[in-house]
Amino acid sequence: MRSIVHPGPVAVDRFQCVGGRIEHLECRLAPGASLLEAISDFVSAHGAQSAVLTLRGGAFEPFSYVMPAESRSTDHAVYFSDRFDAQGEVQLLVACVTYGLRENLSFLHCHADWRDAQGRLGGGHLLPGDVVISQSIQASVWLMHGMGFVVDADAETNFSLFQPRVLKNQDQSQSSSQSPNQSPSQSPSPVAPGVSGYAVRVAPNVDVCTALEQACRAHGINKAVLHGGVGSLVGACFDDGRIVESHITEVFIRHGVIEPGRDGQPVAAIDISMVDYTGQLSSGRLQRGKNAVLVTFEMVLEPVA
């Protein structure tokens, strides 16, 4: 398995995991707002501060993005390209989003595949405040209650990255601000809607499949579904034998499950879309044990009975 050397000290914690509740909703993001504004309005209207989403269909105009790129300095092992601004309306094919907080303000991390006005396929990292929805987008949303993603400094990579954290929801924050003379029986803590889940982040040079399998074993989970899924890998090895040699990539999960193998232990099956720093697009199922995280990989894990 290939690896990469980052400028900072290697963190001891290679897999972060915070438990809470997740609530699944479907909606359409209406034209006229930026992607960040549309998602922020929907998530906050449902009392949450963080979510992961899968987006399909619709379009953007204007549309701005960056690509994975080699670093121009020793401050980072890899970096982003210069900004690209598409000409004309861009049709969204599919995207994954991690939505949370940066310095107590709304922020999101989105990787996507699209088709531009000239019919060319593209992929990369959307600039969330600068892409405006021009045709409504279908969104599958997993709201996060009691947990979420918060941007924090990461010494190892020297980036500020989404990391799982315990988060109070808006209704919980309001109840906690009530008079201290109120007894617990007068203001019982509301039970968060949805089902149990985990906000997770995989650190660099860790195989994403085996990290999730180990987490499932540690939590007594034999079967689970992945939601969202935004990150990067050191190239890729697909289970059909294809190899992406370019080591600087951006990735999102199209479909991910963890199910018992022949020995009853959890086995991850993760289908991804990827763009590398040369602009090559690829997709397929990751080969277990062969795909190291480049900078980060964040997602939600839902245990399934």
Image (cartoon, rainbow, N blue to C red):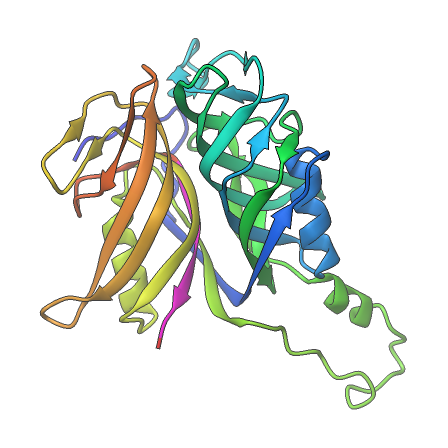
Q: Image quadrant for the N terminus?
A: top left
Q: Going by the image, does 52 lie left or right of 43?
A: left
Q: Per the image, is 210 magenta?
A: no
- Residue that appears at 87% across and 77% down: 180
x and y, in percent, of residue 163 in the image = 51, 46
Tell which of 95 and 77 is nearer to you: 95
* Picture quadrant where residue 160 is located: top right
* Picture quadrant where residue 303 is located: bottom left
Above or below: residue 226 compared with residue 73: below
Residue found farthest to the top: 72
- Residue that appears at 53% across and 37% down: 109
Q: Going by the image, does 163 lie left or right of 132?
A: left
- Residue that appears at 17% across and 38% down: 238
The chief SS type of the magenta part is strand
Q: Image quadrant for the C terminus?
A: bottom left
- Residue that appears at 53% across and 42% down: 162
